[in-house]
Image (spheres, rainbow, N blue to C red):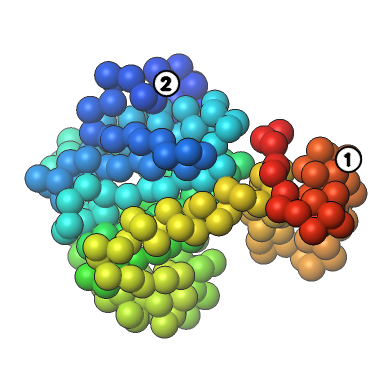
Amino acid sequence: MSANDVAMTLQDAPAAGTSALKNLLVDDKGLIRTITINRPTVLNALNHQTLVELGQAVADVAGHPELRALILTGSGEKAFVAGADVSEFNALSAEKARSYSEEGHAVFDRLGSLDIPVIAAVNGFALGGGLELALACDFIYASDNARLGLVEVNLGIIPGFGGVARLSRRLGKAMASELLFSAGQVKADEALRIGLVNKVVPQAELMAAAHAVAETIAKKGPLAVAAVKRLLREGEGADLRVANSLEQTSFGLIFATEDRAIGVDAFLKKQTAAFTKR
């Protein structure tokens, strides 16, 4: 299966929020959607069916312009996602493994390129493909019992869903190298210290904390938030002059939006802005 075939498969997939979703839970509260990986008996391991459903669910988010933020989490108290479902690996030839990696990249790239911020709420284990999924989000909140790591070399394989590049960009090459080479797992407090996660809270408070920051974001100018997210993505690794040029263009474009009119007018009137969506 080529990358184009993967894209076509995802485009043709049925929308989320239907009975087609067996391994995910989708819940909306106001302007915030939560997607929960729901395979607690196997620590929410990512099998192929779950990966396909996640692609469907992410595509559905893109079709709801009223949403302002997305939270991604796992069911139960033990794991966000403990990794890929290794029981499927023996059936993969080299060619099939590459196609599987391409499919995972397509889903995770689509998640990362959503206009709205995506917050990973990591409860417990986020290992292998689970940490790769969390890294595809914009930032991570973790419970105090979280353990995170890209542990694939323990199995004689490597991360296949973007983990190498995303971990290196998150932590820097040296720190990522140590963790990748050693299959190191870090506890929540160490993950916070090295910048892998943004915040650590008691497990019972994790979803409330994730919702609180999502609600804060939801009150801001949605077009401005989307523009900043796009600049962060497109400017990452770019020459500073290129990144600044992108910012200048976006700054000009945002002044043609209703968001700018609403936000500036409310500020001048000492009121709270009530932004519309697009």
Across and down, in percent, residue 40 comes to 15, 46
How packed mark 2 is, by other alpha carbons closer than 10 Å (few <14, some 14-19, many 20 or more), is many
Q: Mark 1 points at which residue?
A: 256
Q: Name the residue under label 2.
A: 15
Across and down, in percent, residue 253 comes to 86, 44
Q: In this view, does 189 lie above or below 124?
A: below
Mark 1 to mark 2: distance in Å?
Answer: 33 Å
Across and down, in percent, residue 233 comes to 64, 54
Across and down, in percent, residue 203 comes to 25, 65
Q: In this view, does 75 lie to the left or right of 255?
A: left
Q: Residue at x 27, y 19 (%)?
A: 19
Q: Residue at x 80, y 51 (%)?
A: 266
Instruction: Say which amino acid is labelled 1.
Output: Ala
- The local secondary structure at tag 2 comes to loop
The image quadrant where one finds the N terminus is top left
Q: Residue furthest left?
A: 41
Q: Which residue is drawn at 38% across and 48% down?
A: 72
Q: In this view, does 137 lie above or below 116?
A: below
Is residue 102 in sight in this rendering?
no
Instruction: Say which amino acid is labelled 2.
Output: Ala
Whether tag 1 and tag 2 are in contact, CB under 8 A, the answer is no
Viewer-nearest residue: 145 or 147: 145
Q: Which of marks 1 and 2 is nearer the N terminus?
A: 2
- The local secondary structure at tag 1 comes to loop
Q: Residue at x 45, y 34 (%)?
A: 58
Viewer-nearest residue: 42 or 258: 258
Is residue 194 in sight in this rendering?
yes
